[in-house]
Amino acid sequence: PPHISFTPTTTPVLNPPRLPDTFLQEAEREAPMLQAIRQLVAEGETGAFNMYDLEVVRSQLHRFRRNLPRVHPFYAMKCNPDERIVELLASEGANFDCASKAEIGIALRSGASADRIIFANPCKQPSHVAYAAASGVDISTFDGADELFKIHALQPNARLVFRVRVDDSHAVCTMSQKYGAPLAELPELLALATSLQLKVVGVSYHVGSGSMSAEPFADAVRTARAAFDLAAHHGHEMSVLDIGGGFPGTIAAESGKGDEPLLVFADQGAHKPPSFEEIAEVLRPALDEHFPASSGVKIIAEPGRYMVHGCSNLVTNIIGRKYSHRATGKERPMYFVNDGLYGSFNCVLYDHAAPSPLPLFSSADAAQRELDVSSYSDCSIWGSTCDGLDCISKEARLPPLSVGDWIRWPNMGAYTSAAGSTFNGMERPTNYYL
Ligand code: PLP
């Protein structure tokens, strides 16, 4: 690629950054990914791109099944509807949580049959309900009377799942301000469903996305049990429990549970989320106690972030460099890259994310230079649109970089490309797959 080199005008501050303890372990796991990225760069790629490792998705699915063998995973496609990911999950026998007509279309085209899809949007567009009905997707969620009237008009044979409100106060992204009815509303909604001759078959909830505690997962099972009991009291036997999403996206280290790295949130500092195994350890007994296999209740889940968070490295090229803090003598590089807040980094705004930049050199001694943390200094990283808001990171640490150099961003698989735009005419990154 055209590589424009500038001589740095400042001496970098020698204050080594703290890299995650797991860095070396991660580097080993990422070796094939890095090799593929370096090859693309060497072949002349200049645009931003995602390098997907679909093996990560497959192993997350297997990890899910190992830890929660009684729970059927329905991948929440909103998180990343990439067709290769969806096809892989479909071929592995996973099911799908779709929020719209377009997502249902992707799931069906990937080879999943309609009975492997739940339309898990409690407030659906009427034309999308009609499409679901025509496609044979007959199970969907609701949390209010008007949704029942809508479904009565458009899909009277649907099997309905009541979305109950649960405590999501431990989650980074909450949902209960918008979705989930209080348990107390269930009898009235069941009566309405009965009068409309609609079938209510189960209960769903979502503990919030990016939960920082395992306990809400068990608390929510108890709330669901109460909903089942209340329904039974009103003469309704239910048979589906949907435990939603909210599982962390961190990848299992070989050593097992409890070694997840810190997650750093732009507005909430660093936290250690529970590992998937820790959540499963709390969930399994709660499910066994309240919904034992003998109850005959089918248990499903809607993991989104969990499946894809770790499957992509976004790779961005530095297209510009300036310096801030010149007047104080503490100059800091400002790197401009060819993606931004209106593209993949919308996660900074919508998902409370603080993506971690890592340098990516293409030279023979690249790995050595990348690991030489003594050369790292404070800098900021900016997106490519003309909006002043488009700042990806105000406080990053990187070695001195030039225009034409590359920055890679691990763990960019969830809630990134799915909501990216082409604002200012900026292209979205190209997707490559290992
Ligand atoms: N299910 C529903 C209904 C959702 O709204 C979401 C996320 O918004 C998910 C599942 C996926 O959540 P997560 O990515 O936290 O697993």
Image: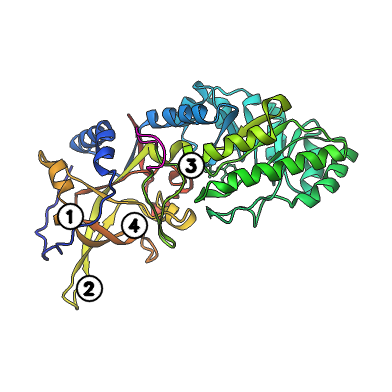
Q: Secondary structure at mark 2?
A: loop
Q: Amino acid at mark 1?
A: Pro
Q: Which residue is mark 4?
A: 383
72, 36: nearer the viewer: 72
**In the image: residue 147, left or right of residue 247:** right
Whole-number angstrom distance, CA of label 2 to CA of label 3 = 37 Å
Q: Amino acid at mark 4?
A: Gly
Q: Residue furthest bottom?
A: 327
171, 197: nearer the viewer: 171
Q: Which residue is mark 1?
A: 399
Mark 2 and mark 3 residues within 8 Å of each other at the beta carbon: no
Residue at 67 percent of width and 39 percent of height = 128
Label 1 vs label 2, nearer the camera: 1
Q: Earlier in the sequence, mark 1 or mark 4?
A: 4
The CB of the residue at mark 1 lies under 8 Å from ligand 1? no
The image shows residue 17, relative to residue 90, as above or below, that is below
The CB of the residue at mark 3 lies under 8 Å from ligand 1? yes
Label 4 vs label 3, nearer the camera: 3
Say the numbered circle drawn on residue 325: 2
Q: Amino acid at mark 3?
A: Arg
What's the magenta region? 252-259
Q: Earlier in the sequence, mark 3 or mark 1?
A: 3
Q: Earlier in the sequence, mark 2 or mark 3?
A: 3
Q: Which residue is mark 3?
A: 305
Label 1 vs label 4, nearer the camera: 1
In the rendered view, how is the structure colored? rainbow
Q: Residue furthest right?
A: 195
Mark 1 and mark 4 residues within 8 Å of each other at the beta carbon: no
Q: Amino acid at mark 2?
A: His
Q: Earlier in the sequence, mark 4 or mark 3?
A: 3
Residue 131 visible within the image: no
Label 3 packing within 10 angstroms: few (<14), some (14-19), many (20+): many
